[in-house]
Every structure is written in structure tokens, then in C-alpha cells.
Amino acid sequence: MEAVYTRTNTLNGNLLGFCPGCMHGTTFKLIGEVLEELGVDSKASCVLAIGCCGLAQEAVSYDLATAPHGRAAAAATGLKRTNPDTIVFTYQGDGDLASIGLAETIHAANRGENITVIFINNGIYGMTGGQLAPTTLVGMKATTAPGGRDPKQHGYPLHMAEIINQLVAPVYIERVSCNNPANVRKAKNAIRKAFQNQIDGKGYSFVEVMTSCPTNWGLSPEKSLKFLEENMMKEFPLGVIRDNR
Amino acid sequence: MSNKVFMKGCEAIAEAAVRAGCRFYAGYPITPQNEIPEYMARRQPQVGGVFVQGESEIASINMVYGAGAGGTRSMTSSSSVGISLKSEGISYCAGAKVPMVYVNMQRGGPGVGTIQAAQQDYFQATKASGNGGFKMIVLAPSTVQEAVDMTYQAFDLAERDRSPVLILGDGVIGTIMEPVVLPEMKSDEEVAAMKAANREWAIVGHSRDEKRGFLDPGYWSTDMQEAHCIELDAMYRSWEENDVQVEELSLDDAELVFVAYGTSARIARSAIELLRADGLKVGMIRPKTLSPFPVKSFDKINYQLCKCILDIEMSIPAQMLFDVRLAVKERCAVDTCLRSGGNLIERDDIIRKAREILNGGAE
């Protein structure tokens, strides 16, 4: 019988280990499918962030190094500049990319490094257990903001895609989500474009993936989806922000 | 015909690195080592290499982490307070076994300190260059020629061990100009072959029938992490047997033995010449590797004759002193001759101290 759907070869069958309702697994699947479909999975190298994404490091079959917290874009810069034929991507959460690694994120984008940046935004620190993130919504509770995010104390959520859109060099910026099958397909197309740009030598591509964190939001996976759609996506609207041809 | 050239320490180090096959450099401006990034900015493009001015010390070390992870001979440099910022990245290189070379042209501290030469980073260099208790081979040049030779060798050591190697200089070594003989330039073919040899573990992309490149600065399993620490420890112990570099001067008859490295050792050497001319029996142990420390050299001292070991360093409080004491094992008195904060040790200070010890203070 012909197999019409199989697991991507870039996932080796080891446990991904993410919580129920988390969208890291979906995103890793999409990345893997895209790498295979573009025929570059054997040339790919992931610079992985610190955080929940580390749970995937033994479950993917491509080359991988974990960077210090926040520094993935700097490490990817060194790797790509010295190995231009390697397909280099970073995979980073909001604490990593938008808080501790803000400088590395902005400067790699500003230099127009020919890399692909996958940014997972769920508005909370996952691995450490629900602390306030730079993308936490106003009023949203966190273990370090028990009364909810208060703009007078914590400022407002950082809109990374829009901030990067202020720079001249980036070629492609899109915000997607994995909240339903239609958006998963759009997310995959965005990830494909972000890798195709690198293959074509076009430069820096940034894909922000809006995801949920049922564990640290304290919601069921189903209610998390609703929160993602009704609150997170209102603050962080989906869509293409820049697509230079 | 002499093939000596007259070069500043920082530039000579940068050129030696290029000749050793360094094809990636990232750094951030800080005095007194700006001539390294400036030289690299000119030189790397000439050899098909890459220079990046990082947005910070932190970004720079992590660019080197990425380039090293890709199998390219890579280097960064800074001075003292800037090295502190690199600590996490250095620890990651040690943990994930990413080879790289870095230079610390020490200045006064703590904090931003001064921009003049000091030796106040000894503990940081040899004991705790980052979290986790890793060790590195630390090379301490005393002349520009030695800085060149050590830099050239450092890349081989880093690659052999897949471990960071530190060139610990100071503001004098970095900015002084001296005639040097530069080492042979490795050919493009040699550089390519060295990189190809790293492909097995480098994260450059591997096909499905190959083992993937996987550089892991941490483990989910405590037992695996411990096994990694034990493996590293075995390597560190092998350094103590195989990789000590030291200069021993007149230990046989010495009644006073100086211990000094880098710029302090240059000054101590000139003091010895004058003291010996006056008939005072002074010797010296000059560690060229601060890690591994030349412990065995201290067994060559004749403790029947030796009255004192004098630790000479540009650091107050003294730091190398503790390694000296461990090596002396209370076989002899240990005293210090120190300056700090960017002030150089003066030859006359050393001579005065030596006379005090040997003649009971009589001039």
C-alpha cells in the first residue's frame, strides 16, 4: 500500500517530550518536512536555544548545537559565515530571543545574516515554570508577576516581528500560528519561504510562530487554543510583515 | 639574511593566528588589545577568512562558538573586564568541546579598572574562566616572539583537545614592539584539510547514513554529565604530564628563586642579571603554561641552599602565590614582590627585595 503520510525522516522517533497541547512538536515537524522537501536536510544545522526547545535535541536527526541562552543568532552568524553551504537556522523561544538575546537578535537581523530564525512566542517562560516573558500580555499572570503584567512595572509586550521590520536588511518577516490546520499549512509555507530565501542567498528571514503553553498558562489545551486565538493573536496579529523579492 | 620583522605584540599575535590557519575572528573594541581586531579586519579578507566586529563581547565569543562548531579555526580576544563577559561562552566551548583560541591582554582591575598592563586575572584564567570547573591550557608569553610561537601552537592544542586555549598576555605584551620571526603560513590546502578533519564532529550538515554533528554543552542525565566531567578531568590530568612549558634559570645553586610570568618575568630577568653580577645566587622559575602549572620545577630547587621563593606578579592581592605555595610544599619560605592596578613592577623593587632576603637588608 502506498504511504500517503509518513513521519519526516528528520524526526528520528525519539520522544520529543513536550507537554500536551504544546506546539513545539508541530513546529519541529514542519521544519523537518520543509528541510526534506527542499532537499537540504543533510545540509542543515540547527543552533538551538536554551529553554523547552532543548527537549527536541535528541529527537531530530540533523546537526545541532545548543547555544548559550539568547546567543543563537550570534553562534549562527559564526557558523554560516564560515560554512556558507550549510543551511543554518536558529530555534528560539521568547525569553531567549526577545529578552536575554535581544541584542544578538537585532544585530544579526541588522547585518542581514543569511540565516533562518524560527521564533516561538507563547508569552511565557516554559522550562523554568511560567515567569514573566517580554511578550507576556498586559494583565496576563506569571509566577514573577502574580498580579498580572502591569505596564507601570513591566512595560508592554515586545513585538519582535515589528521591531525587526524597522531594520533595512531583513528580507522576510512573517507571523504565523499552529492553532488550526489552515494556519499550520500557512506556517509551513512561511517556514519554507524562510529556508528558500537562505538557499537562494537572499538573507535574513524571521518567522514568528504564535503558540500556546497550557502548562504555564494554567489552562487546558482546548482553553489554551481559545486564549491564543482571542488574546495572543489580538496583540500579535498574524500575517506577512515583509516579503522582499 | 634575517627574516625578522618589527611588530607590535597584538599585531604579531593576529598574524601568527592567521598563519596557523585561523579563518574566523570576532571581537569587540577594548584597550589594550584593539590592534588585534583592527589587524584581523584587514587581514582575514586577504586569506579568505572572516572578520566580524561583534555587537558585544558576548556576541563575539558566541560567534566564535558557532564558527568553531563548524570546524573552522577561530579566535576572539579582549582584555580583563571584557573577558568576564565572555565567560559563559568560554564555558560552553569547554562543555560542548568546541576548539577555539582566545587572548586576554590583561589590564588593571577589578571592574573597569585601568587600561595599563596588569596580571590581575590569574585566578580567572587558571581557576574559573566560567562556570562548571573546567580547565584550559593557559599560555603566558613573556616576549612578542613567544606570543607569536604560542599563538601558532595554541590552535593545534585547541584542536587536539577540542577545548579552548587561552593566551594570557598583558598591556605590555600587547603594545610593545619587538623583532620577531613569524612562523610558516599554512597553505590554503592545509587549512582546508584541517577543517575537513573536523567535519566528523562539526555541525556542518551530515547525510542520513553518517553520524550527525551534535555539540552538546549539557546533558539531561546527571550520570552522563558526570561521565563527561570525568572524561574532561582525565584530559586535564594528561596536560600535567605532557603539556607543561616552563623556563628554569639557575636553580642548582640558587639561594633565592623568583617565580614570575609574562611581563613580570622580563623585569625579574633583568634583575637577576644585575644580582648575579654582584655574586648573589638568584634563580627563576618562569611558567610558560600557567595551566598546567609547572609543579615539578619546584622539585629541582636545592632546598639546602635556598632561603626563599619570591613570587613576583603585578597583582595585589597576589594570585599565582597560591599555586607557588602548593608547589613549594612548605620546603622553604615564600615571599612576594607585587604591584597592581596597572603599575609595572620595577627592577629596583625586585633587587631591593632580593638584597633584603639574602643580605638581611644590607645594600
Image (cartoon, coloured by chain):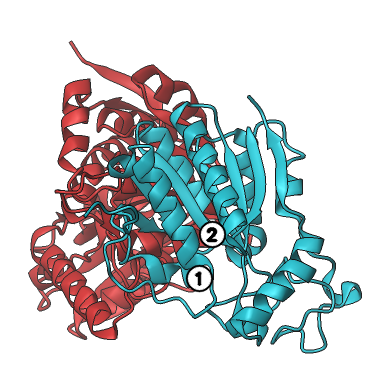
Q: Where residue B38 sits: x, y (%)?
A: 52, 29
Q: Is residue A160 visible?
A: yes
Question: Which shade of the palette goes to chain A?
Answer: cyan
Amino acid type, mark 2: Gln
Rounded to the nearest whole Å, what is the CA distance between mark 1 and mark 2?
A: 8 Å
Quadrant in which residue B351 is drawn? bottom left
Check disc 1 and report its element: helix, strand or loop: loop
Amino acid type, mark 1: Gly
Q: Residue furthest right?
A: A152
Crowding at mark 1 (Cα within 10 Å: few <14, some 14-19, many 20+): some
Give the left or right position of residue A155, taking residue B285 as reference: right
The earlier-in-sequence mark between 1 and 2 is: 1
Image quarter (top left, top right, bottom left or bottom right) of the N terminus of chain A = bottom left
Give the residue at x 63% y 37%: A172
Q: Is residue B281 above or below residue A42?
A: below
Chain identity of mark 1 = A
Between residue B287 and residue B274, name the one nearer to us.
Answer: B287
Q: Is residue A79 visible?
A: no
Q: Where residue A67 sits: x, y (%)?
A: 44, 59
> Which residue is identified by label 1?
A51
Crowding at mark 2 (Cα within 10 Å: few <14, some 14-19, many 20+): many
Give the left or right position of residue B9, taking residue B149 as reference: right
Between residue B43 and residue B333, name the one nearer to us.
Answer: B43
Q: How many marks?
A: 2
Check disc 2 and report its element: helix, strand or loop: strand
Q: Is residue A228 above or below residue A64?
A: below
Q: Are marks 1 and 2 in contact (CB under 8 Å)?
A: yes
Chain identity of mark 2 = A
> Which residue is identified by label 2?
A92
Question: Which shade of the palette goes to chain B?
Answer: red
Q: Where residue A190 sits: x, y (%)?
A: 57, 44
